[in-house]
Amino acid sequence: MKIGELASATATKVETVRYYEKIGLLPPPARTSANYRAYGHDHLARLSFIRRARDLGFTLEAVRELLTLSDDKAQSCDAVDGIARVHLTEIDRKVADLTALRVELDRIIGSCRHGTVADCKIIETLAPRTVPAK
Amino acid sequence: MKIGELASATATKVETVRYYEKIGLLPPPARTSANYRAYGHDHLARLSFIRRARDLGFTLEAVRELLTLSDDKAQSCDAVDGIARVHLTEIDRKVADLTALRVELDRIIGSCRHGTVADCKIIETLAPRTVPAK
DNA sequence: CTTGACCCTGTAGTTGCTACAGGGTGTAGA
DNA sequence: TCTACACCCTGTAGCAACTACAGGGTCAAG
């Protein structure tokens, strides 16, 4: 399997596959006589795993940990669970932040009277304590 | 006002202030005889504006546009309103994405039986189509 | 007169890719 | 056989939006 096939099979760009290899997430595959990368099923499985975890918003560092953990089949699953839970907490925090921000932005936009910039409530709200210029 | 004072007055790091100057968001201030940056009220107002917009999640590029618009007091407020509305749409999309992702992650975590990694449902879910290794 | 807190410039690092530049390889059609 | 084209290679630079040095200079207090 050449890099282009692996990439399209996992909805990844070729450059990204090479990038994952460079940072040590994907092991270097065998090479053909023309120095082309030749991938096998294990590479496909590993890259699928990486992509899925990335789609779920895990950082590459978290993916790296998950991969290490998944290689040790006898180990307890709790470390995996822990990483996922930390990630869930982060998502909750982001949603809360964005929602609060959304409320405020909505309020600001609602105050727009479509006049000139001089009377613009949006601009005013953005610069809460403007001291008379100069 | 020295850079450290300006920075702490706006909850900004000194390096970030210099960074804003470098990318042309904050005009270069006068210098003291010792070559220290000397800021005035207009700088404080402008940096407050930038920080507030950043806190609301506007990109630096959007902040740049807002600053340009706010400098032209006679202009219509609609362009400002437009930028804010586009931003609001983006926030809504992010919240929707994160919420969907949260639901799935929650489901995955809920399936954890705290056994060994070999039986880990989280790992399984992450690698949906694993082909027998090697 | 020295210690420490501040200031300066310039460069490199962060995350997770993406986009070249400048080459080599493999195959299908004229 | 030539050649066009899609694919592959390495290496480097770029994106956002900072942050963190390194290696210096300045200034007020004790």
Image (cartoon, coloured by chain):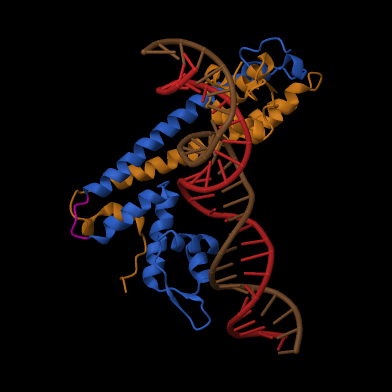
Chain colours: A orange, B blue, C brown, D red
In the picture, which quadrant includes the C terminus of chain B?
top right
Residue displayed at 62% across by 25% down: A50
Q: Position of residue A1 (x, y in %)?
A: 61, 15
Residue displayed at 65% across by 19% down: A38
User: Dividing the picture into quarters, in which one does residue A77 lie?
Assistant: top right
Q: Is residue A28 above or below residue C29?
A: below
Residue displayed at 19% across by 48% down: A114
Is B117 covered by the magenta stretch? no
Is residue A95 shown left or right of residue C29? right
Name the chief secondary structure element in magenta.
loop
Residue displayed at 30% across by 55% down: A123
Q: Is residue A106 above or below residue B18?
A: above
Q: Is A105 or A10 nearer to us in this picture?
A: A10
Q: Position of residue B68 (x, y in %)?
A: 29, 57
Q: Which residues are magenta?
A: B73-77
Q: Is A6 or B76 nearer to us in this picture?
A: A6
User: Dividing the picture into quarters, in which one does residue A17 lie?
Assistant: top right
Residue lying at the far right of the rendered structure = A74
Q: Is residue A47 visible?
A: yes
Q: Position of residue A33 (x, y in %)?
A: 67, 21
Q: Position of residue B83 (x, y in %)?
A: 30, 45
